[in-house]
Image: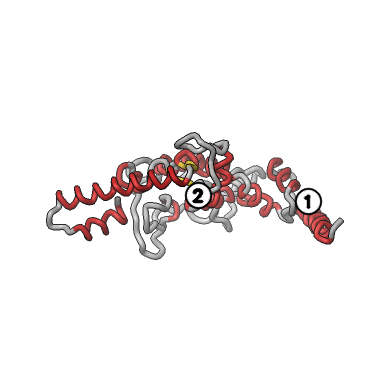
């Protein structure tokens, strides 16, 4: 064995022993199986759960949206933008709406600020241990952490999405190249303009896997060009309908609300 292999074997032996000492009587079997198959074994149950969801991004996305559907849209909530510190509002429509991060709708300690559901041991979304009370020291499900990162930076998961599409371009059907890029099927500016009144759990799908595709770069460039032309046409139409406004005013408006 090389020095690196010896170090890994020794390190994994210590981590596995520590993990087994910390495991409760009940623990999700797929998570434990995943942890023990890692090149570097997670030394604690919480790290095992986090590693599981990091390596199952699309599953985390589905779960987070299902939990949001269980919570439902808070009464009186509407999708708004804002830049005030502590408001919980996103400054741009490119960020997914998150009503439970807003102080008026937050459910307090022990509830996920993304989906609104209770959080239990190790950041898990179900009370497998029968405690009956959420973990009041937690604010995120481990799955929701992974889902949120996926929603705000889907390009980081291009390999996962390529495999999901069987390495075929979603637009042309051709083989995906190394330069292929992640794209939103329905542009987010159009979601903000046309669908902002949709129910919140429904809105989340526009940031999740149902609205994401990997396309070859040439296809993506053409699609972005068509979308840019559409927005320019909308700006000109807005100016013609509002003659007191200038082109610069229209561009400023559409940069945040189109």
Q: Quarter holding the N terminus?
A: bottom right
User: Residue at left 67%, top 53%?
Assistant: 46
Q: Is residue 225 left or right of residue 69?
A: left
Across and down, in percent, residue 196 comes to 33, 45
Residue 115 badge: none
Q: Give the structural element (helix, strand or loop) at label 1.
A: helix
Q: How many marks?
A: 2
Tell which residue pokes out farthest to the left in this image.
243
Q: Is residue 101 left or right of residue 139?
A: left
Residue 215 coordinates in the image, percent (x, y): 48, 42
Judge by depth and name the residue closer to the eye, 232 or 58: 232
* In the foreground, 131 or 229: 229
Among numbered discs 2 and 1, the one appearing first in the sequence: 1
At horizontal 30% and vertical 50% (from top left) the residue drawn is 258
Can I make out residue 170 in this image?
yes
Task: Check disc 2 and report the residue beneath it.
Answer: 154
Q: Residue 202 placed where, x, y %?
A: 41, 40
| Of marks 2 and 1, the one in the foreground | 2
Q: Which residue is mark 1?
A: 20
How far is mark 2 from mark 1, CA to CA?
Answer: 34 Å
Residue 122 vs 169, above or below: the answer is below
Q: Residues within 10 Å of mark 1 (few under 14, many from 20)?
A: few
The one nearer the camera, 172 or 4, is: 172
Most distant residue in the top direction: 173
Q: Residue at x 39, y 60 (%)?
A: 87
Badge 2 marks a residue whose secondary structure is helix
- Are dots 2 and 1 in contact, CB under 8 Å? no
Image position of 50 (left or right of 158): right
Q: Quadrant of residue 125?
A: top right
């Amino acid at each position: 064995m090389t020095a690196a292999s010896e170090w890994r074997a020794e390190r994994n032996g210590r981590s596995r022993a520590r993990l087994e000492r910390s495991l409760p009587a009940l623990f999700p079997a797929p998570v434990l199986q995943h942890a023990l198959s890692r090149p570097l074994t997670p030394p604690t149950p919480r790290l095992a759960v986090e590693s599981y969801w990091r390596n199952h991004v699309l599953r985390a996305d589905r779960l987070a949206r299902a939990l949001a559907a269980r919570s439902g849209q808070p009464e009186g909530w509407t999708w708004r933008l804002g830049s005030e510190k502590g408001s919980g509002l996103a400054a741009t429509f490119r960020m997914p709406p998150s009503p439970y991060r807003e102080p008026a709708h937050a459910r307090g300690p022990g509830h996920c600020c993304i989906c609104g559901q209770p959080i239990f041991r190790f950041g898990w979304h179900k009370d497998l241990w029968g405690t009956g009370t959420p973990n009041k020291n937690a604010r995120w499900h481990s799955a929701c952490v992974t889902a949120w990162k996926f929603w705000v930076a889907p390009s980081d998961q291009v390999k996962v999405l390529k495999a999901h599409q069987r390495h075929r371009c979603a637009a042309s059907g051709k083989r995906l190249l190394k330069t292929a890029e992640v794209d939103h099927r329905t542009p987010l500016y159009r979601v903000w303009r046309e669908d902002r009144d949709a129910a919140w759990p429904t809105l989340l799908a526009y940031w999740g896997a149902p609205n994401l595709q990997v396309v070859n770069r040439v296809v993506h460039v053409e699609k972005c060009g068509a979308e840019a032309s559409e927005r320019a046409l909308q700006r000109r139409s807005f100016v013609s309908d509002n003659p007191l406004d200038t082109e610069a005013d229209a561009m400023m408006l559409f940069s945040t609300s189109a």
